[in-house]
Image (cartoon, rainbow, N blue to C red):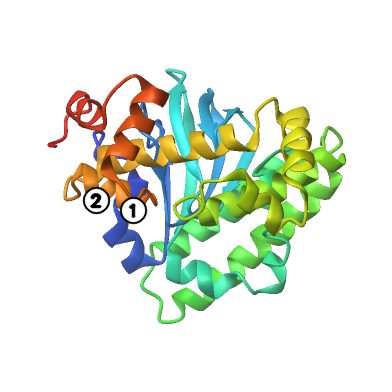
Amino acid sequence: MQTIPENKHPVLFQDHIDQQGVVVVEVGSMPTGDRPFQSENLVIGVCLEGSADFMYDLQPRRFEPYDVGVVLPNHIFSYSSVSPDYRATLIIISPSMYKSIIHRESFIDYQKYHHRPALTLTDEQFIKVKDIIQVIRYISESAHPRRKEALGNLLDILFYALTRYRGEEKTEKVANTRGEQLFRNFYDLLLVHYNKQHTAIWYAEQLNLTAKYFSITIQRATGKTPSEWISEMLVEQAKRLLSNRRDMTVQQVAYELGFKENATFCYFFKQQTGLRPSEFRKKNGTNS
């Protein structure tokens, strides 16, 4: 197993992940804290002990023993806390490896993980998944000439198992209402277009709905209007950029998020957070 420095989470070692393709590590922390975090990797996590509480795509989640989470690239984590005994195994899959497996038959239903990234295993399922991961770990740390091919085949086995266990999960709560399905479709669009389209009307048009019906249905399903979801997404992305991209000025952050004027972005950010962007950046220990 790799040794990971205590002060840095393994998902932050992007150069190493890119080089290896697949990295398997054990962790006792989450990669975020009070800063929003996005990973370009595919991450599969298995909770072994303890628990973790966090926001995932702006919604509260809890990760507990026997839970498996499959986190697709570019989803948002924020506000995490973990119990003192938290321990989990992560399979971190680089963007290039992700692209090579995404069209494989075993991963054909990967879009489902956008909306329900986690499932809870039974005792028997948990043992089987741990055994598969142990083999993946062994191969990932080897120098075999067919290492990538072997890892692809092992990931096939893992995803086939998870797909089967998702189907067997008896406590599954699948959202079937029109409002919940509409929110899923809206949120998928928002993940892609948040930095280009800031109006609820645009999203309603993409979904072939009137703005009024779209707004009422989303609010009934989630308790928030589409505009509130758009604002929350922009705020989380702004916090992430202000915290992590020291090379970007506040004005560059504004343009990256689709604001035509820096003043408009600064006003929006303060209305949402109570702080100017420069104040937030200073509070989080970065340069303005």
- Relative image position of residue 169 (x, y in whole percent): 82, 40
Q: Amino acid at mark 1?
A: Glu
Disc 1, SS: helix
Q: Quadrant of the C terminus?
A: top left
Mark 1 and 2 residues: CB-CB less than 8 Å, in contact?
Answer: yes
Position above or below: 135 against 219? below
- For the question of whether residue 100 can be seen, the reply is yes
Q: Residue at x 44, y 65 (%)?
A: 95
* Picture mark count: 2
The residue drawn where x is 78% and y is 47% is 166
Q: Toward the viewer: 133 or 19?
A: 19
Residue 139 placement (x, y as % from top left): 46, 65
Looking at the image, which is closer to me, 252 or 57?
Answer: 252
Position above or below: 196 against 21 = above
Numbered tag placed on residue 252 in the rendering: 2
Label 2 sits on what residue type? Gln
Q: Quarter of the image holding residue 79?
A: top left
For numbered disc 2, what is the local secondary structure?
A: helix
Badge 1, how many Cα within 10 Å: few under 14, some, many 20+? Answer: some
What residue is shown with label 1?
256
